[in-house]
Image: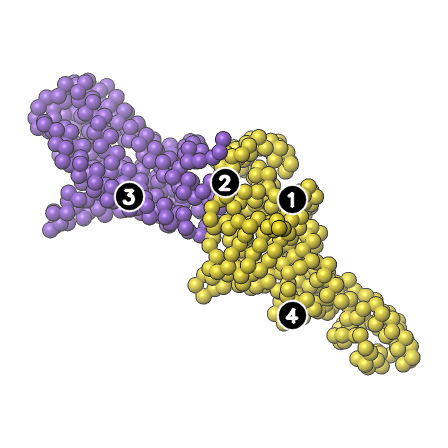
Chain colours: A yellow, B purple
Amino acid sequence: MAADPPIEVRGLVKTYGQIVAVDHVDLTVDAGDVYGYLGPNGAGKTTSLRMMLGLIRPTAGHVRLFGRDPLLGVAALEGVAGFVEAPQFYPYMSGRRNLELLAAYDGHGAGGRVDEALATVELSGRAGDRVGGYSHGMRQRLGIAGALLRAPKLLLLDEPATGLDPAGMRDMRVLIRRLADEGMTVLLSSHLLPEVEELCNRVAIVRSGKIVYEGAIAELKRGAGAVYRLSSTDDERALSVCRAQRGLGEVRVEHGYICFTADAAAAAELSQALVEAGALITMLSPETVTLEDLFFSLTEGDGRTSGSVGGSSDGAMPTAMSS
Amino acid sequence: MNPGVATVYRWELRKLRYQKRTYLGLGLAVIVPIIFVAAVSFRNHGPHDVAFGDYVDRSGLAVPLVILLFGAIWMFPLIAALVAGDIVASEDHNGTLKTILTRSLDRGQIFTGKALAAATYAIVAILVDGVVSTVAGVLKSGFNPLQSLSGTIVSAPKGLELVFVSLLVYLIPILAIVCIGLLLSTITHNSAAAVVGTLMFSLIIQLIAILPGLGGAQPYLLSTQFNAWQGLLRTPTDWDPIIRAAWVCALYGLPALGAAYLVFLRRDVAGG
C-alpha cells in the first residue's frame, strides 16, 4: 500500500458567519514536493494553513497529514513543522531561549538541535539577544529555526519572504531550496509569484477561498499555449488571414500588434499564408507566458490577463482552470 | 525526556521571571505592608474600624491580619488577576499561542501548566506579603502575644502559626479568583480586559454584599470568603466559615476553570 501523502485536504470549508474564507479546497502534496499555495491577500491561504496545523476547526471537510487528522491531537504533527503568518516569539527572551522553550515543548531530542538550527538560519551570532530587538527578517529566520528543531519531513510556511528586503528574500529562497534539496516536503503559501516560480514544482492557485488551478507549474504553462505578436506590411490583410487560419486562437489587436495563441507549427503555417496573401511579416515573436500572467488571469475578475501585466504576453488564457 | 505538564509549568514560571507585571504584583505585595507599618508608626495608632486594627501597636502579628482584611478589597484580587488574566490572553494577542500549539504538547497540557503557574504566582504573592507584613509588624511592634477575636490571649508562637494558617485559608478565595481570571483570559483574548474584568468581578461581588435586602446571600458571596480565616482567630476555632469557603469557592472557581479548559481545548486560534 502506498504511503499516505504528507498533506491531503478534501472538501475543506471554513466560514465566518456569512463569509466563506475557504471554499471546498482539495489538494494533495506528495512527498518531495515544493508546493506553492498561491493567491492574493485575503484569498484564504492562511486560514487553510491554520486548519492544516490544527489551529482552527474546519466548518466542513478534512485535513490529513501523513494520514493523521490534526484535530485529534498533536500526534498528527509528528514530523510536521511550520508557521502561519509571521512567526511569533516571546520578545522578552533571547532567540536561543525561545528555541530552548520550543525544543522543550517538542521533546525527542530537539534540545540538541538548537545550535544547529541557529547556525542553519545564520542567527548564531545574535542568539543571545532579546527577540524584541530582532528585525522582521531575523524573526522569519528564527521561525524557520524553530521549525527545524522538529527535524520535520513536512514544512508548512506561510508567506515566509513577506516583509523581507530583497537580500532577505533571496536568502530565504536559498534556505528553502536547500531544505527541499535535503528531501523535505515543503508547502509554501505566497502571493509573491517569483518566489513560487523559482521554488515550487507544483501549485494551487486560490481565489476567494476556492482553488482555481492545482497541478504542476509546467503543465499550467503548457496549457496556456504560446502567445505570439505579429506586425506586417499590411496589418488589415494579416488580421483577416489570422482569423481564417486554423490553429490560431484569441486573435486580437493590442497596442498596434496582432496577438494570438498558437503552437509552433500553426505559427509556421501562418507565416506561409501571410506571404501568399501578400502581407509580409515584419515581426512575429513568441512571448513568454509567466506564472504571473497565469496567476492574474486565474485570480482576476473576467479571467482575461491585463495588458499591463509584466510587459510579457498580452493575452495568456490558460486552458486548465481546474483539476 | 518527553514533554508534559511539568515542562509547561517550568517554562511558564521562567517566562514570568522575565515579565515586568510579575514584579508589579510582587512589588505591591511587598510595598503595601511596609507603607502600612510606616503609616501606623507615623500616626502612633492602627486603624480602629477593622478587626485587629487596635492591636497593631501591641503585637506585630496583627499587621499581616489587618493587611489580609484590607487586601481583600482590591489588592490581592488584582495581584491574582495580573497573571491569571494575562497568561493565556497575552499569548493570544502576541501570536505566540499558535507557536506553542504546533509543537508536541496537547492543548490540555498547555492549559494545565499555565493554570498551575498562575496559581503558583498568586500563592507566592500571598505568602510573600504575609512574610513581609509579619517581619515589618514584628520590627514595629514586637513579637508579642496576640488577642484573638474572642478576647483570649494567644502566645506569640501560636499567633505566628495562626497567621500562617490564615494565609493558607486566604488562598481558597484567591484561587477562585485565579480560576475566574483564567476564564476571562481564555475567552477575551485580551490581557487588559481579562485583568480588569477579574478585578471588576471581585468588586461587583463586594457591592452586591452591601445591597439592601441581599443579606441572606452574603455567606455565599465570594467576597465573604476572604474573611473565612477569621474563624481561626476565635476560641474555640470556628471551622464553619472555613468549610463554607471551601465549597463556595469551589462553586465559583471550578466551573470557571472547567469552562476555560474546554474553551481552550476547542477554540480556534486565529489571532496573531
**Disc 4 element:** loop
Tell me which chain the residue with mark 4 is part of: A
Q: Are marks 2 and 3 in contact (CB under 8 Å)?
A: no
**Disc 1 element:** loop
Q: Are marks 4 and 1 in contact (CB under 8 Å)?
A: no
* Quarter holding residue B68: top left
**Disc 3 element:** helix
Q: Label 2 sits on what residue type? A: Ser
Name the residue that disc number 3 marks. B254
Name the residue that disc number 2 marks. B104
Name which of mark 4 and mark 1 comes first in the sequence.
Answer: 1
Q: Position of residue B152 (x, y in %)?
A: 8, 23
Q: How far apart are marks 4 and 3 (CA)?
A: 57 Å
Q: Do the residues labelled 1 and 2 touch (CB within 8 Å)?
A: no
**Disc 2 element:** loop
Mark 2 vs mark 3: tell me if same chain: yes
Mark 2 vs mark 4: tell me if same chain: no
Q: Label 3 sits on what residue type? A: Leu
Residue B171 in sight in this render: yes
Mark 2, mark 4: which one is toward the viewer?
2
Q: How far apart are marks 2 and 3 (CA)?
A: 27 Å
Name the residue that disc number 1 marks. A184
Q: Label 1 sits on what residue type? A: Met
Name the residue that disc number 4 marks. A303
Left or right for A291, reference B242 = right
